[in-house]
Amino acid sequence: MAGEDWSKEEVSRCVEAYFEHLRLDIIGQRFNKAQLYRDLAEDIPRSVKSIEFKFQNISAILNRLGVEWIKGLAPLSNFQMALAEAVEAQLPDFLNAELHVEKSGMNDPAAIYIDRAPERASRSEDVPSYIRDLERKFDPIERDRKNKELGDAGEELALSIERHALKAYNRADLASKVRWVAKEDGDGAGYDILSFRPDGQEKFVEVKTTNGGNRTPFYISRNETEFSREAGERFHLLRLYDFTRDPKAFEMIGAVDKYVRLTAEQFKADFEA
């Protein structure tokens, strides 16, 4: 079968197997990837290596959609329409499933290393229209924005991180003053957490959480954007990603548009002149 296009049935079988094992991966149940490829190679006349590549192509699609992918199967961008269609067929059930995940690492602020923000790409990636259609249908920005449980969990972890950091600097007095503004006062301040630097200067922390990767796009309001410019170096946007399985983080300090490209996705509609 080398050199021949994959049939719809072969693609679907690969995607089904991928999602079956992604569920196992998320709940921490180990499996042998090499054996999985060998088993699939007996069902469909494809080499083990070509199946592995196909799995990495699936990871690439899921990464574009801000969805978890199997650890160790790094995204390999080689988008195909048949593969996108097969992923689309599996996604609704996967996204609606309640996977019971061990969340021990999410409660340990000392375990979170805050990295630098990823570099902004110099040019836009050339992505096929059917992948763009998938991104609109399974919009990762809107999905994360509506997931209040995810957002609250991220803010709670960020609160712990701030308090832990201040205590490490022997500033328990400041740690006791850290406030979860978004929970206590409601949204609208332009940030979620009021914290402090070790010298006592105020620090405004906005938290954005996703189960996707570090380049998953996120929603930021006009108010938050303008506040990041006004507050300057006192504003910190903490991006938590891969949150449910293995929380990681990076930080943006100051105006967010120094780091990311801002695109208008929503408009105010009124009848004024």
Image: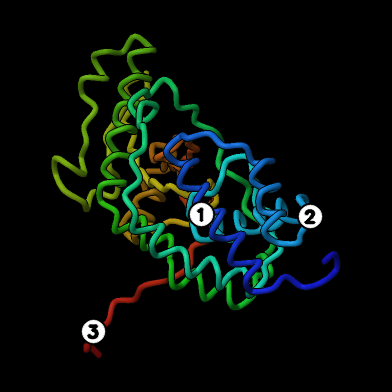
Query: Looking at the image, how many numbered discs can be counted on the residues?
Result: 3
Dot 3 corresponds to which residue?
Answer: 270
Answer with mark 3 or mark 1, whichever residue precedes in sequence: 1
State left or right for residue 104 relative to residue 256: left
Q: Earlier in the sequence, mark 2 or mark 3?
A: 2
Q: Residue at x 64, y 45 (%)?
A: 36
Q: Look at label 1 and name its amino acid.
A: Phe
Name the amino acid, label 3. Answer: Asp
Residue position for label 1: 19
> What residue is drawn where x is 60% and y is 54%?
59
Q: Nearer the viewer, residue 118 or 95?
A: 95
Can I make out residue 226 in this image? no
Q: State the residue at coordinates (50%, 69%).
A: 88
The residue located at (61%, 59%) in the rendering is 14
- Residue 47 shows which numbered tag? 2
Distance Cα–Cα, label 3 vs label 1: 44 Å
Closer mark to the observer between disc 2 and disc 1: 2
The answer to the question of whether label 2 and label 1 lie on touching residues, with beta carbons closer than 8 A, is: no
Q: Which sits earlier in the primary sequence, circle 2 or circle 1?
A: 1
In the orientation shown, which residue stands out farthest toward the front?
A: 42
Give neighbour class at mark 1: few <14, some 14-19, many 20+ (Cα, 10 Å). Answer: some
Residue 99 shows up from this direction? yes
206 horizontally vs 40: left or right: left
Mark 2 belongs to which amino acid? Ser
76 and 227: which is toward the camera: 76
203 or 241: nearer the viewer: 241
Mark 3, other Cα within 10 Å: few <14 / some 14–19 / many ≥20: few
Q: Position of residue 65 (x, y in %)?
A: 50, 60
When the figure is inspected, residue 98 is found, relative to residue 271, above or below; the finding is above
Residue 86, image x and y in percent?
A: 55, 69
* Label 2 SS: loop
Mark 2, other Cα within 10 Å: few <14 / some 14–19 / many ≥20? some
